[in-house]
Image (spheres, helix red, strand yellow):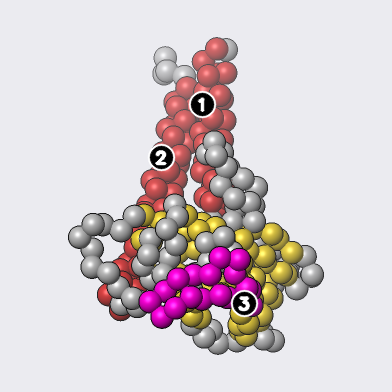
């Protein structure tokens, strides 16, 4: 009796592990992200805002990304995306940005992409919106609050900033972590193609690492389920007389 209960508990535990792996994989990739998610203070970088469609029936028709006003970015350039119309909004800065060419009193604080007919993000799909930014502020991170509008007029607000205690937030905003520039790194006043390529490689590397961990977790979970089922079968067999 006790052996039977143990076998059933093992099967249930393994099944729960598999479900947890799939559940975590889904929740980890569902929100709007910025890729790569790391850059250097004072430098330029090319990032992609990756927007997955979470709805089972509606399509994403508009994406709005807000840039911070407390740590404004002087240069913001957009890569054209077929089927989408991009509009930028400038705001007057409370504290002008000092550059070699003088003070900048206004900066882009919002980017809105709107899909043309047939170009919206369908269920089960995602889209990437490329932006060149710089020079990046002397801060630990840049938080880009984003709004995702669906064809059924629903809006998902990805605006929750990272929690101070490390706990997960419900609708996390895309966050670009910034590291201090190395002392011997040469100064640059414009983005270089090598830096852009390095950013792309870092993004691919980060995506590959996340996928690797997900696959490893899935293999462990499936293995546990197989072993539990084998134990269940062997436990149900009776020795020959």
Q: Are marks 2 and 1 in contact (CB under 8 Å)?
A: no
Q: In this image, 70 relative to 196: left or right? A: right
Rendered image: mark on residue 220 = 2
Q: What residue does disc 1 label? A: 10
CA separation, marks 2 and 1?
14 Å
Q: Quick one: SS at disc 1?
A: helix
| Mark 2 crowdedness (10 Å alpha carbons): few <14, some 14-19, many ≥20 | some
- Magenta stretch, overall SS: strand
- Disc 2 vs disc 3: which is toward the camera? 3
Pinpoint residue 103: horizontal percent, then vertical percent: 48, 75
**Residue at the top extreme of this rendering:** 2
> Residue 195, relative to residue 7: is it above or below?
below
Rendered image: mark on residue 90 = 3
Q: Residue at x 58, y 75 (%)?
A: 106
Q: Residue at x 57, y 30 (%)?
A: 12
Pinpoint residue 207: horizontal percent, then vertical percent: 41, 59
Q: Are marks 2 and 3 in contact (CB under 8 Å)?
A: no
CA separation, marks 2 and 3?
50 Å
CA separation, marks 1 and 3?
59 Å
Q: Which residues are magenta?
A: 89-106
Number of marks in picture: 3
Give the mark, 1 or 3, whose residue is nearer the N terminus. Answer: 1
Pinpoint residue 174: horizontal percent, then vertical percent: 54, 59
Q: Quick one: SS at disc 2?
A: helix
**Residue at the front extreme of this rendering:** 102
Q: Quadrant of residue 105?
A: bottom right
Q: Quick one: SS at disc 3?
A: strand
Give the mark, 2 or 3, whose residue is nearer the N terminus. Answer: 3
Give the mark, 2 or 1, whose residue is nearer the N terminus. Answer: 1
């Amino acid at each position: 009796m006790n052996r039977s209960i143990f076998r059933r508990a093992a099967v249930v535990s393994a099944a729960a592990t598999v479900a947890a792996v799939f559940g975590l994989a889904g929740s980890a990739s569902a929100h709007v992200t910025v890729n790569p998610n790391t850059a250097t203070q004072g430098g330029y970088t090319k990032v992609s805002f990756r927007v997955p469609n979470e709805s089972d029936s509606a399509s994403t028709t508009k994406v709005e990304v807000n840039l911070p006003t407390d740590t404004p970015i002087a240069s913001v350039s957009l890569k054209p995306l077929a089927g989408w119309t991009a509009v930028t909004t400038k705001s007057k800065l409370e504290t002008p940005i000092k550059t070699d060419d003088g003070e900048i009193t206004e900066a882009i604080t919002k980017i809105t992409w709107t899909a043309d007919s047939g170009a919206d993000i369908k269920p089960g799909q995602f889209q990437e919106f490329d932006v060149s930014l710089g020079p990046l502020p002397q801060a630990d991170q840049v938080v880009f609050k984003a709004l995702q509008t669906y064809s059924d007029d629903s809006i998902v607000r990805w605006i929750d900033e990272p929690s101070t205690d490390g706990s997960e937030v419900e609708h996390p905003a895309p966050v670009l972590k910034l590291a201090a520039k190395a002392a011997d790194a040469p100064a640059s006043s414009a983005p270089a193609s090598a830096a852009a390529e390095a950013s792309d490689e870092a993004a691919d590397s980060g995506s590959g690492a996340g996928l690797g961990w997900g696959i490893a977790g899935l293999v462990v979970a499936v293995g546990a389920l197989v072993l539990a089922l084998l134990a269940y079968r062997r436990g149900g067999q009776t020795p020959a007389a």
